[in-house]
Amino acid sequence: MINRILKQSTVFLLSGVFLAGCLTPSTIVPPKQYILAPDIPVSQSESVGLSLGMRALNTARPYAKPNIAFLTEDNLLGYYPDVLWAEQPATVLTRELLDVLDASGAFTDTGDAASMSRPDLVLTGELRKFHEERSGEGSSAVVEIRLELRNPKEAKLLWAETISRSEIIDGSGPEAVSAAMERTITAIVEQARFSMLEKLTNF
């Protein structure tokens, strides 16, 4: 009889422990988020006397989510666990491009093409690469974008360029990748501004 009571008590005790574990909320640790904030120098340019509207950059599928991506020598794409970009990289690049072009003074007005009334020029593009590229010699931050500038009234292509840049990553881990990505974004934006304005001023 005593043994039976002891067995029942043990079962009830174990059941209580099990249920407590199931009902107690587990602690969820949110992923770390890294902000991309490149410091891009601004330079003045000759005015082209036209307004510019920009559409948000499209994103290639591997970079559609804010995961921090890496590419191995075997062409395998992977993502750092438990870390994210605080914003979509395409959003950062769109904003930085528009800010630099606006600050250049080259255009009579700049902004989101969807919010402007018939801009003279429309800039569109795609973010094609945004990852850490790993090799036996080290790692680099790689960014590639495609930009196209059109006259929307004539659907005429005025300028187009695919711009690729890479920067060596000093160190390892997401912190080092973030710092190198900021340098790469700066190089991409500066090249885009120079190439586009050079084309417009030489029409």
Image (cartoon, rainbow, N blue to C red):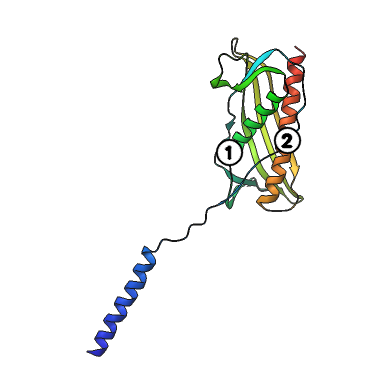
SS category of the residue bearing label 2: helix
Instruction: Depth check: give the residue in front, 116 or 19.
Output: 116
Q: Which residue is rendered at x = 73% and y = 40% of the image?
A: 183
Instruction: Depth check: give the residue in front, 56 or 58.
Output: 56
Q: Which residue is rendered at x = 62% and y = 33% of the image?
A: 127
Instruction: Depth check: give the residue in front, 113 or 187.
Output: 113
Identity, as a three-letter code, of the amino acid under mark 1? Gln
Question: Label for residue 88?
Answer: 1
Question: Label for residue 186?
Answer: 2
Q: Which residue is rendered at x = 66% and y = 48% of the image?
A: 72
- Is 166 placed above or below 139 here? above
- Is 172 placed above or below 201 here? below
> Pointers 2 and 1 in contact (CB under 8 A)?
no
Identity, as a three-letter code, of the amino acid under mark 2? Thr
Q: Residue 57: percent from the left, percent from the top? A: 59, 29
Q: CA distance from mark 2 to mark 1?
A: 16 Å
